Image (spheres, rainbow, N blue to C red):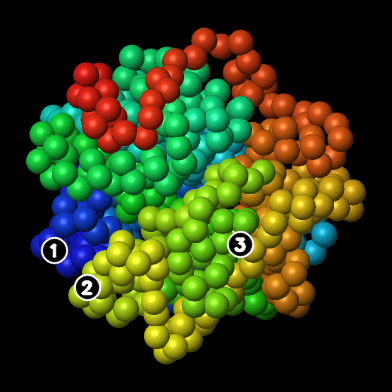
């Protein structure tokens, strides 16, 4: 299995090289040259596997340069940190299935990928006797999950940019209370898109990237997407039996990585009926799918801050497939985005898009109401991002299908919003209670790429 760039400017590389490259050296995103196909017979043979066992079956089909025993060990260590024996359990409430992705160390779905990626980095660096300086941007959850995925690992320093004052209090504490010498938090006076743009610019400076051994933990890193593919297979196997009913997934979406993992699972042969892309008021992707309108607007601050994004990095991976691997067409699209603030697609292309996805935008009032209604009817607490996905699923997905809603965070991570909706204090896990009163360390900076670069150079290990 080898990997290529969406921009077509690199020769095929191995999985380990793809992990370490992060963003392709031509500015594109890395993808496998082809997707392994899972037959129905193979899929049925996976029933009853534990999550780590299933993860090995899926991930190993994309990895041929890590010995079997080593890969199994990496996977087992990654998921031993989760507090639930099923890792990503599925529960049913009010006619929908909730895929709980928040049982990791930072109570967010990002742990599923970043525990694995942190162990991968450490393994490859030790093998190659190298060091790595990770730079990432976060709207809240990626940063804390990345920090906890690499803290204490040899040869790695990490720099995380987040929008100052625009994450939840728990998200901020989970990041800034890690005061290890190799961890650097930067709160940027700006938006997540500002943070992401600066990270992309640093990776686009190939001399700088090579000189300072930059590594990526954002979902631009293929290994993150790959790890997330697993739980689509896991959920499908949990909600079906030999008499398979249609299965659809509702995915609260900001940076398009999580739902792209579902798209990959579908390309591999997982029988997915619909992939529902659920957005908040920052609905550029919904406008694209429903009205062929991919045009930039301002970022709106909402009660689901991890989705307060305009430019979704992983959307480029999907466009590469939409354009049938035509890298010139892809470059034209991004040139149009840079010059005119939009991407245009043909009617035929939009037919393909709507075959792949449906979409809905859920505003703040509806989000809060969904938290209230779902709790009143089931006693189950939804975080605001999950509530967006649940509301979209109840509105759009057929009732005669298994409607799987991805629960991307524990409600305690957004306790202020949940309390605003329900009128009482959300019970906090001990891991969250322990954050209060901890010493923190964070640098507050303007969205100035030169200042960020200077800070990085001054603080690398």
| Residue 294, position as x, y percentages in the image | 46, 69
**SS at circle 1:** loop
Quickly name the residue at label 3.
Answer: 278
Q: Are marks 2 and 1 in contact (CB under 8 Å)?
A: yes
- Residue 199 to residue 257: above or below: above
Label 3: how many Cα within 10 Å (few below 14, some 14–19, many 20+): many
| Residue 384, position as x, y percentages in the image | 69, 46
**SS at circle 3:** strand
| Residue 409, position as x, y percentages in the image | 61, 42
Residue 187 image-quadrant placement: top left
- Please state which of residues 51 and 103 is positioned toward the viewer in this rendering: 103
Which residue shows up at 51% across the image and 82% down it?
355
Quadrant, the N terminus: bottom left
- Residue 398 to residue 146: above or below: below
Q: Are marks 3 and 1 in contact (CB under 8 Å)?
A: no
- Residue 46 to residue 291: above or below: above
Horizontally, residue 368 falls left or right of residue 33, namely: right
Quickly name the residue at label 2.
Answer: 327
Q: Earlier in the sequence, mark 3 or mark 1?
A: 1
Label 2: how many Cα within 10 Å (few below 14, some 14–19, many 20+): some
Horizontally, residue 60 falls left or right of residue 285, namely: left
Quickly name the residue at label 1.
Answer: 9
């Amino acid at each position: 299995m080898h990997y290529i760039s969406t921009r077509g400017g690199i020769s095929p590389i191995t999985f380990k090289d793809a992990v370490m490259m992060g963003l392709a050296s031509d500015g594109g995103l890395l993808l496998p040259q082809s997707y392994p196909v899972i037959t129905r017979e193979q899929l049925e043979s996976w029933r009853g596997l534990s999550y780590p066992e299933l993860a090995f079956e899926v991930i190993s089909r994309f990895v041929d340069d890590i010995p079997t025993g080593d890969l199994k060990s990496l996977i087992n260590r990654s998921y031993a940190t989760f507090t639930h024996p099923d890792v990503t359990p599925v529960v049913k409430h009010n006619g929908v299935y909730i895929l709980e992705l928040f049982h990791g160390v930072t109570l967010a779905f990002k742990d599923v990928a970043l525990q694995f990626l942190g162990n991968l980095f450490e393994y490859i660096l030790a093998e190659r006797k190298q060091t790595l300086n990770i730079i990432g941007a976060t709207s809240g959850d990626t940063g804390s999950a990345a920090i906890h995925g690499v803290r204490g690992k040899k040869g790695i320093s990490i720099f995380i940019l987040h929008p100052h004052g625009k994450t939840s209090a728990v998200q901020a504490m989970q990041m800034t209370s890690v005061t290890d010498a190799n961890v650097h938090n930067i709160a940027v006076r700006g938006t997540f898109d500002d943070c992401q743009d600066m990270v992309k610019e640093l990776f686009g400076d190939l001399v700088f990237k090579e000189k300072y051994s930059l590594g990526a933990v954002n979902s631009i890193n293929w290994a993150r997407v790959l790890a997330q593919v697993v739980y689509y297979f896991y959920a499908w196997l949990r909600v079906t039996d030999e008499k398979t009913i249609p299965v659809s997934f509702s995915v609260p979406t900001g940076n398009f990585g999580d739902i792209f993992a579902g798209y990959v699972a579908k390309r591999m042969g997982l029988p997915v009926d619909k992939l529902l892309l659920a957005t908040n008021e920052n609905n550029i992707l919904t406008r694209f799918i429903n009205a062929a309108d991919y045009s930039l607007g301002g970022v709106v601050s909402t009660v689901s801050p991890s989705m307060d994004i305009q430019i979704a990095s992983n959307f480029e991976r999907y466009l590469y497939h939409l354009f049938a691997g035509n890298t010139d067409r892809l470059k034209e699209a991004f040139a149009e985005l840079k010059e005119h603030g939009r991407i245009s697609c043909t009617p035929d292309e939009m037919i393909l898009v709507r075959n792949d996805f449906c979409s809905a935008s859920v505003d703040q009032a509806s989000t809060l109401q969904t938290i209230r209604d779902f709790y009143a009817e089931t006693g189950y607490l939804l975080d605001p991002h999950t509530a967006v996905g649940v509301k979209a699923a109840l509105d759009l997905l057929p009732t005669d299908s298994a409607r799987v809603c991805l629960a991307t965070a524990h409600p305690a991570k957004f306790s202020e919003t949940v309390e605003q909706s329900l009128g009482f204090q959300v019970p906090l896990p001990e891991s969250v209670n322990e954050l209060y009163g901890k010493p923190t360390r964070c640098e507050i900076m303007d969205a100035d790429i030169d200042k960020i670069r200077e800070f990085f150079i001054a603080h690398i290990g």
